[in-house]
Amino acid sequence: KLDSEQKSYLARFETPNPVGPWLLKGGPGSGKSTVALYCMASIVRFAQTQLSLDQRPQKILFTTYTRSLVNAAKVLLSSMGIKADEVLEVVNIDALVHRDLPPSWKGRKCLREHEVRPRATEALATCLLDQKGFGFSRKDIDFLIDEIDWVLVGQDLVDEKTYLVTDRTGRGRALGESQRRQVWQFWKTLEAELESRSECLFSQRLQAAAHNARGRYGYVFIDEAQDLKPVAIRYCARLCTNKRNVFLTADSN
C-alpha cells in the first residue's frame, strides 16, 4: 500500500507517455522500489492498451543488480496484476549484458571475484619488477582491484590522461598524479594478462556492452542504482530510445 506522499508521486505517471528522467531516493525499507513498481505498472497498463488497439506499444524494462531483487519485483508486480510479457521485461543486469556483448567478447571467461585476485597479484608482481619505486605493494591489491572496477573501467575511462583528472571523491584514499600513473600502468598490465588468457572482469563486460548497446526500450527502470557502477547505469540508459525516460531508485546516503 502507498501512503499519501507516495500516491502524489505516482500521480505524475497516471497520464499517457510521462517524460523523465526520474530519481527516487529513500532509506532502506522506505518503499522506493515499491513506488517505482507502481509507476512502471501505470506505464505498462497504458502500453497494453495500445497493444489491444493494434498500435505498436513501447517496450518497458525493469532491471537491477541481483536475480533475487528481480524475482521479488516479479512477485510484487503479479500482485498488482502485471506480468512480464511482450510489453514488459523484468531481468537482471547480467542477463542483459550478455545480449549486447560484441561477438569477440562472448568467448571470454568472466572471472568471479575470487578468481580476479591471483591475476591481479601476477600483474602487480610484473609492475614491481619492471619499475623501481613502484608505490604499491601486495597489501594494496584489494584497493587496486576496487579502483579498476569502480573508477577506471567503472567510469569508462579510456586513457590515462582522463584518469589523471577524474574526480575520485568518496574513494577513501587520495592519489597524486604519480600514483595515478602507476595505477594506470598496473591496469594495462592486468588487462593484457586477462586478454592473453581470454578472460575479463565483469566491469569490462559492462563496458563492452555499453559501447555496443542500442536503444530498444521506451522506458528503463533501474532499481537500487547505488549498487551499480557508473558504466552499468550508462549502459542501461543507452538501452532507452529516449534518454530522458530513465527511472532510478537509490539509497538516500
Image (tube, rainbow, N blue to C red):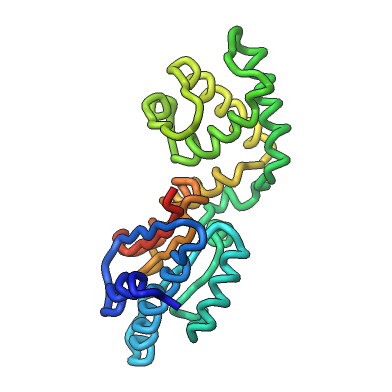
Q: Is residue 55 left or right of residue 231?
A: left
Residue 14 appears at what percent x and percent y?
30, 79
Q: From this view, report whether residue 112 is shown above or below residue 77.
A: above
Q: Give the quarter of the figure containing the N terminus.
A: bottom left
Q: Can see residue 173?
A: yes
Q: Is residue 55 left or right of residue 182?
A: left
Residue 226 appears at what percent x and percent y?
48, 50
**Residue at left 58%, top 14%?**
135
Residue 5 appears at what percent x and percent y?
33, 70
**Residue at left 58%, top 61%?**
95
Location of residue 240 by image quarter: bottom left
| Farthest-out residue, bottom | 53
Q: Nearer the viewer, residue 155 or 54?
A: 155
**Residue at left 57%, top 35%?**
146
Q: Can see residue 99?
A: no
Q: Nearer the viewer, residue 166 or 194?
A: 166
Residue 250 appears at what percent x and percent y?
44, 55
* Count of marks overlaid on the render: 0
Q: Nearer the viewer, residue 193 or 6?
A: 6
Q: From this view, report whether residue 62 is shown above or below residue 204.
A: below
Q: From this view, report whether residue 15 is shown above or below residue 215.
A: below
| Farthest-out residue, top | 132
Location of residue 35 by image quarter: bottom left
